[in-house]
Amino acid sequence: MAQPTVISLLLVALFAVPGVLAAAVFQPRDVATADSVDTTAESFYSSFWNDGTAKVKYNNGPNGQYTVNWSGNKGNFVAGKGWNPGGPRAVNYSGTFEPNGNAYLSIYGWTTSPLVEYYIVESYGTHKPCSSPTDDAEQKGNVTVDGSVYEIWTKMRKNKPSIQGTATFPQFWSIRTDKRVGGTVHTDEHFKAFTAGGLKMGRHSYMIVATEGQDSNGTASITVGVGPSTS
């Protein structure tokens, strides 16, 4: 993925939605936390990062729902909902994802010790991740899971934003070969595929169902924790 050259550090006040209390602190790749205030509902972690140039509006809806609209064909952002910590689980999600240009819909997260940024890509816009020579990516194999073949890739990021500040770290990618918006993702199978490819993960930090836009525009409305209707 293209990484921003401008990092904007902002502080966003606490905000609450039904079932969720969330605070967003705009720092490089470590941007928000959420804790449940309703013990009858699942708690979701909400994350919204903006490089300071992307023109984007993120709305943190109730429970696992969020919407995001972006325009201007400039800048990079990552927004979504999930869990902190992340890790092996069946991730259900549904909604719409309508990018115009380069954008990703993915299960996105981080590990520490070692520091790793990972993507389980469900859909994307005009650019398939790891497909350009300039991406300098290496394919490590494939995994068949969740009704499709996913390609396993890795590449290094040097002196880029991370949850531990500017750092050098690998990215791990599991890229679905037939794009979809909505379904169940068994993250444990993707993590096993990373390991089988020699890609070592660490202790799980946050994990979200993320919408990311890069020099593009579009809209997305995603609900985490709810699968698409089978009717």
Image (tube, rainbow, N blue to C red):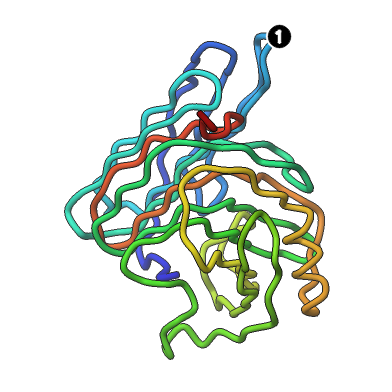
Quarter holding residue 131? bottom left
Quarter placement of the N terminus:
bottom left
* Residue 70 drawn above or below residue 135: above
The residue at the point 63 percent across, 43 percent down is: 184
Residue labelled with disc 1: 40
The residue located at (53%, 11%) in the rendering is 18
Q: Position of residue 53 (x, y in %)?
A: 27, 54
**What residue do we see at 62% from left, 28% from top?**
44
- Image quarter of residue 151: bottom right
* Residue 19 vertical position relative to residue 211 in the rendered view, above or below: above
For this orientation, the residue located farthest to the left is 72
Q: Nearer the viewer, residue 25 or 111?
A: 111
Q: Is residue 62 above or below residue 227?
A: above
Q: Residue furthest bottom?
A: 133
| Within-10-Å neighbours for mark 1: few <14, some 14–19, many 20+ | few
- Amino acid at the residue labelled 1: Thr
Q: Nearer the viewer, residue 207 or 21?
A: 207
Number of labelled discs?
1
Pick whichever, 104 or 163, lies toward us: 104
**Image location of residue 90, percent across then percent down:** 72, 42
Q: Residue at x 54, y 36 (%)?
A: 81
